[in-house]
Amino acid sequence: MRSLEEHRAAILALVAPLPAERVAVAGSRGRVLARDVVAAVDLPGFDNSAMDGYAVRAADLDGASEATPVRLPVDGDIAAGDTTRHVLAPGHALRIMTGAPLPEGCDAVVPVELTDGGADTVEVRVEPEVGRFVRRQGEDVRTGDVVLRAGTLLGPGHVALMAAANVAQVEVHRRPRVAVVSTGDELVPVGSSLEHGQIVDSNSLMLEALVEAAGAEVAARVHLRDDADAVRAFLTAPDGDPDLLITTGGVSMGVYDTVKEVLTEVGGVEFVKVAMRPGMPQGCGAVAGGRVALVTLPGNPVSSFASFHVFVLPALRAMTGLDPADDGGFDAVAGEQWPVVREKVELTRVVEEAGVVRPSGGQGSHMLAALAEATALAMVPVGAAEVRVGDTVHCLPILGHHRDRG
Amino acid sequence: MRSLEEHRAAILALVAPLPAERVAVAGSRGRVLARDVVAAVDLPGFDNSAMDGYAVRAADLDGASEATPVRLPVDGDIAAGDTTRHVLAPGHALRIMTGAPLPEGCDAVVPVELTDGGADTVEVRVEPEVGRFVRRQGEDVRTGDVVLRAGTLLGPGHVALMAAANVAQVEVHRRPRVAVVSTGDELVPVGSSLEHGQIVDSNSLMLEALVEAAGAEVAARVHLRDDADAVRAFLTAPDGDPDLLITTGGVSMGVYDTVKEVLTEVGGVEFVKVAMRPGMPQGCGAVAGGRVALVTLPGNPVSSFASFHVFVLPALRAMTGLDPADDGGFDAVAGEQWPVVREKVELTRVVEEAGVVRPSGGQGSHMLAALAEATALAMVPVGAAEVRVGDTVHCLPILGHHRDRG
């Protein structure tokens, strides 16, 4: 039996970071940089005021205080966005707004709250330090600095930094395009009237949601009946020009396991048992003339869901230029005892609260209520026969379950 | 000065959960249920096999073992999706696939691995328990059960459960539509050639990314110059039919603070100082005849970013039917000392690693490099003059910075 890590390595060997494309910074949130980003301007772009107040020469206010205020003539205003290069005459002040460029000769700003706020003359009640409330050109970023490295997953703060650095477009990895295929004669579309023996095709909708939650695109969502010709046709020339194909079902020990049957005949795909529970029957390879990576997931919804997290998500991360070894996981403490199987990695659906995890209910691989309730998958390694209260367990967050948690 | 909590309460008083709309389960990921979801079918929908193997009566295999196998005639196959109601004759077996409906009279399944796998007759090497490898109708969910409660943020596991329960459409709260307005004559679009005194309008792109990362829709993204007529026109009749309007800039102590000037004249909006750093100058109210909630954020990018997390995000959560009091935060341990201001809540940009946080660099409210690097905002309460090594600090995850984390 193959280990979980060996099978993940086999899948990662099938994929590579996707090519770069240029996108506007405005639409770059959630994308991954394919190239370092270099500042096009200094930040700040010019010496400017950190406050609404008065641009002064500190030396002109020697000894100013509440008791002994100093009065200066005000020669005018400098608003934010004023493109004139003002000069501050010795012994004078200029009224200045937050973000407005400092006039030549100014070495400090006095906030309006520490003055009488006058427009023609101003009474200043403080002796400013040189440099006080002044933001210096380039003190945050200098033109030509690498401000973000390739491999960065772009969030709102990165968008702000790139835009401020006057970078209008960036190179990011193309989003993976994923075709999701559910197989099985028993499956009917949601909302159908179910005959005895039929079940709703929930897996394809679940996998679609997982693909999107992982930041990839769904190239196609297809249900195939257990018909070898139809399965062969799709797997050799999949719709939607996908980079990755995910199937569920048809890969177990049954005599109607069409995916396995067809792909064994077509070749290029290996079917293995992986030492994990749920999710033992797995497969991976390349189809469509070797151009499209393929991961075959088991048909049980919980198996398919857990397998997605440990096999497909790392592949999607690798394809977008992220580190597939970073599983986003966290260590938690078991809040109750539960049995696991010693020979396999056990992926227990758990609810995490304040660092403590508990199984979320029925753990059968067909148990969807407990799956929906779970917030994480506890990964219990091979060799343990149970998890005891107080044990530390490594947990994978369930994709898209909550909002981001940095 | 108003406390952060008081100002947040004032903003929350301006908003309410948005009306419900029906959406397909397939597109429901990321939405929030406006109504409980009730199962339309049992899960499982019928007694079925948990394994590929043979449907038997346990009593027919009394004493079967490796040493003393029992041979049964095989009357045929039951595939998944077979809608016939099969009957198992006493002393016989039927070959059955995972998920296929159990024949009448069957009370156990023997996995194919524990047999010779025969098609006409089968040699069974184990004495099965009654009920072994049988999934009972309704053991997970019963028709009419409430499977998900109103207020649930829908993830892939919820999509799977709802689809499997044959619920094709659900009622979710409408997504908030947010208009983002940056103000200031100094702002030019990203990619412009900058004159002395001009800066790129990065705030509107940052806020757009924050709104999207929060799961809301950007109804409009607009830059307004410091022109009272233009500001008045937009704020009284905003583009894009928004539910919420966010402005940045124009609300401080300056003489060109047009947003404040116009809204003071129009009325319905209060401008306050909030005891927080960064982000002291804040405002909120209702515009467009009281129909549109308004939050005015400071113009400094870091102030605006931090204010979004503590004021706008809770409002968006309330509008989508989520609990605004759930800040998604976590407690971490300070890995180094840093000074804070005693009279205000300090929102320090920090990097969190394995539960330990450290300030991410220059903390000036114009410092974007440190903002982009941060993964969380540490909220240091009023009354502390410093954070010491080992202190526990409550942290807000930065929206959209990483992928979901449970």
Image (tube, coloured by chain):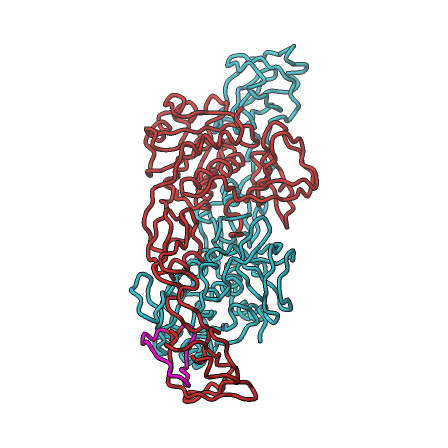
Chain colours: A red, B cyan
Q: From what the image shows, is residue A69 above or below residue A383? A: below
Closer to us: A135 or A78 = A135
**Which residue is depicted at the point 32% across and 47% down?**
A21
Quadrant of the image occupied by residue A293: top left
Quadrant of the image occupied by residue A332: top right
Stretch of the chain drawn in magenta: A81-99
Identify the image quadrant of the N terminus of chain A.
top right
Q: From what the image shows, is residue A371 above or below residue A140? A: above
Closer to us: A158 or B118 = A158
**Which residue is depicted at the point 61% across and 30% down?**
A382
Image-based side of A177 in relation to A5, left or right: left
The question of residue A90 being in magenta is answered with: yes
Q: Position of residue B163 (x, y in %)?
A: 49, 42
**Which residue is depicted at the point 30% across and 63% down?**
B192
Q: Position of residue B88 (x, y in %)?
A: 57, 20
Residue A191 in sight here:
no
Q: Position of residue B403 (x, y in %)?
A: 49, 48
**Which residue is depicted at the point 33% across and 39% down?**
A240
